[in-house]
Image: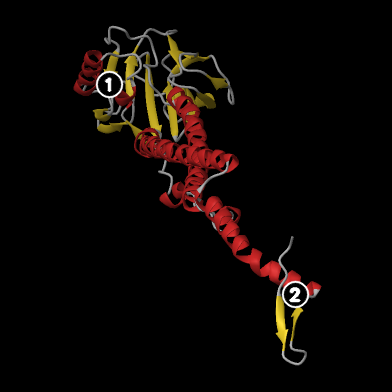
């Protein structure tokens, strides 16, 4: 049976049973349960604070794995930075030097990006610093790769132009002269064969029988193929581009016409004795930037070093030209 409580009433001199209202009963019950509730809540807090649930434990493992992956990614980015630095060095100091191109400015190499904060969504997390650093390095490397790709495209274009230039620059002898015995007069001051006075000889003379084929010494376009009264007689001028021109004088016959495109080694005419000439021969000139230069410096495609040295010696020892 439930225990009843009583209190003494001094007015009636009797013990009266204490009867509690519903609110008093509820309040007393709550007061009795409060410590237990507090202890329970504290226990739950401590459990959640120091003991991981299976889901939390799984998330923590995944987070550690992701952080490890980010660290490995940063190491790989360091290696890629070294590779990119080496590519930049070779691009500026080798490729562009070979093709006579200016290096890419460092400001362009750094490929900075301004404007709004593009990484705002990655801020405010426990691992934000690592994630932000990785993302920024990756974006920087991507921009540098774009710059380097454009630079290599430019180098590739330079390669094609270099091949075209190498094919255009005069680089062979203009007539068959394997034994080098047909070299008669070289570049420089020579005794004119007709006027018998010292005169600057702007080219090189090759003795040959009339009708000997004459070859274009580089790719180009014929700008003159006609007879002139300036002493050259029938002669051909070829514009090779890149500021190079060649002249072939005293021809007996033309094999090309004005405006025609020619390739190195193509026959453009035949040896003759037209114009102011002391005998059948080819007078050959090379002009760079509008000024005559020594043709002997442009026979590197069909002569060995020994043959080239002999040709230079023969041309410079000749005291008299044939025109």
Seen as rendered, the residue at the extreme bottom is 11
Q: Secondary structure at mark 1?
A: strand
Q: Determine if residue 271 is in view.
A: no
Residue 57 placement: quadrant? top right
- Quadrant of the snapshot with the N terminus: bottom right
| Relative to 165, residue 51 above or below | below
Q: Relative to 144, is 185 on the left or the right? A: left
Residue 29 placement: quadrant? bottom right
Q: Secondary structure at mark 2?
A: helix
| Relative to 16, residue 188 above or below | above
Seen as rendered, the residue at the extreme front is 13
Q: Determine if residue 231 is in view.
A: yes
* Disc assigned to residue 185: 1
Seen as rendered, the residue at the extreme right is 22
* Disc assigned to residue 291: none
Residue bearing mark 2: 24
| Along the viewing direction, whichever of 278 and 52 lies nearer the viewer | 52
Between the residue at mark 2 and the residue at mark 1, the CA separation in whole angstroms equals 135 Å
| Relative to 142, residue 197 above or below | above
């Amino acid at each position: 049976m439930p225990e009843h409580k009583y209190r003494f009433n001094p007015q009636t001199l009797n013990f009266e049973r204490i009867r509690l209202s519903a609110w008093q009963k509820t309040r007393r019950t709550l007061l009795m349960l409060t410590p237990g509730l507090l202890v329970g809540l504290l226990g739950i807090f401590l459990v959640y604070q120091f003991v991981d649930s299976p889901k939390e434990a799984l998330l923590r493992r995944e987070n550690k794995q992701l952080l490890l992956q980010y660290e490995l990614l940063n190491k790989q980015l360091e290696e890629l930075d070294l590779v990119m630095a080496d590519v930049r060095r070779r691009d500026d100091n080798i490729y562009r030097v070979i093709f006579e191109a200016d290096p890419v400015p460092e400001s362009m190499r750094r490929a900075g990006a301004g404007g709004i904060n593009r990484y705002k969504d990655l801020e405010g997390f426990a691992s934000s610093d690592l994630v932000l650093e990785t993302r920024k390095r990756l974006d920087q490397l991507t921009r540098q790769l774009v710059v380097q790709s454009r630079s290599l495209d430019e180098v590739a274009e330079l390669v094609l132009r270099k091949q075209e230039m190498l094919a255009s620059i005069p680089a062979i002898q203009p007539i068959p002269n394997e034994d080098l015995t047909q070299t008669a007069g070289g570049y420089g001051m020579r005794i004119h064969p007709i006027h018998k006075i010292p005169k600057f000889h702007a080219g090189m003379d090759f003795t040959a029988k009339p009708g000997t084929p004459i070859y274009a010494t580089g790719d180009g376009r014929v700008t003159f193929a006609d007879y002139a009264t300036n002493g050259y007689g029938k002669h051909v001028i070829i514009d090779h581009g890149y500021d190079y021109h060649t002249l072939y004088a005293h021809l007996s016959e033309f094999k090309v016409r004005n405006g025609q495109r020619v390739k190195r080694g193509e026959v453009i005419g035949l040896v003759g004795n037209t114009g102011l000439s002391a005998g059948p021969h080819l007078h050959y000139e090379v002009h760079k930037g509008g000024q005559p230069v020594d043709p002997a410096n442009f026979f590197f495609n069909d002569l060995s070093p020994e043959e080239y040295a002999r040709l230079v010696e023969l041309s410079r020892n000749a005291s008299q030209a044939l025109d």
